[in-house]
């Protein structure tokens, strides 16, 4: 399933003011709860799972991309959020460059194949430099979803 099946405009942060990747992760999970995509009761568990994953190995990739992700027990479907950060934020990426596009992905622990498929689609789409440029130029969550779609 494409990312747009799980991503809603309210879960796209445009140029968020985050002091570091830890602050950004918190803001992204907060946005998932504010938008109603994730129950507020799962905020702490979700945030903790993402932080633990990030401490084990950075999810910063290359070319300004980071894909923090976690598998959660009992989640009733995939959840996603995105942050578009033209100025970039340090994500301890493989190439040492700041992340400008951060896609947060939460999947049910029971659906490992879906997790891999969605991560593969994200990496494939974000591997295109012109796609990344168009995405970073978006001024609304709706336009980001339409470009992705």
Image (cartoon, rainbow, N blue to C red):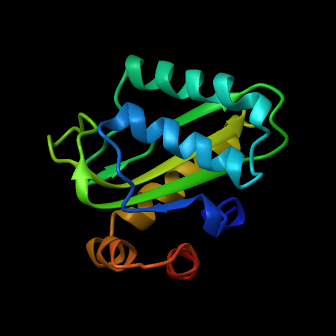
Q: Is residue 117 above or below residue 130?
A: above
**Could you tell me residue 62's position as x and y percent?**
25, 49
Q: Is residue 50 above or below residue 1?
A: above
Taking 69 as reference, is 28 above or below it? below
Quarter of the image for residue 11 reads bottom right
Question: Residue shown at 68%/31% (left/top)?
Answer: 43
Identify which residue is drawn at 50% across, 75% down.
Answer: 144
On the image, the x and y values in percent for residue 3 come to 61, 62
The answer to whether residue 108 is visible is yes
Q: Is residue 63 visible?
A: no
* Coordinates of residue 85 in the picture (x, y in percent): 32, 59
Across the whole image, how many numbered discs are drawn on residues?
0
29 relative position to 64: left or right? right
Residue at 50 percent across and 81 percent down: it is 147
Q: Quadrant of residue 20?
A: top left
Quarter of the image for the C terminus: give it: bottom right
Decide which of 65, 114 is in the foreground and name it: 65
Q: Is residue 79 left or right of residue 94?
A: right
């Amino acid at each position: 399933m494409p990312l747009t099946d799980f991503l809603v405009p309210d879960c796209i942060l445009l140029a968020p003011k985050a002091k570091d990747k830890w602050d950004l992760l918190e803001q992204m999970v907060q946005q998932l709860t504010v938008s109603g995509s994730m129950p507020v009761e799962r905020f702490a568990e979700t945030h903790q799972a993402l932080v633990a994953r990030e401490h084990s190995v950075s999810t910063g990739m290359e070319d300004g991309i980071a894909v923090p992700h976690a598998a959660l027990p009992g989640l009733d479907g995939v959840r996603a959020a995105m942050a578009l950060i033209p100025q970039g934020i340090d994500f301890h990426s493989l190439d040492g460059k700041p992340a400008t596009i951060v896609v947060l992905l939460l999947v049910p622990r029971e659906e490992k194949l879906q997790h891999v498929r969605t991560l593969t689609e994200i990496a494939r789409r974000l591997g295109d430099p012109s796609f990344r440029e168009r995405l970073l130029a978006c001024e609304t969550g709706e336009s980001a979803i339409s470009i992705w779609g």
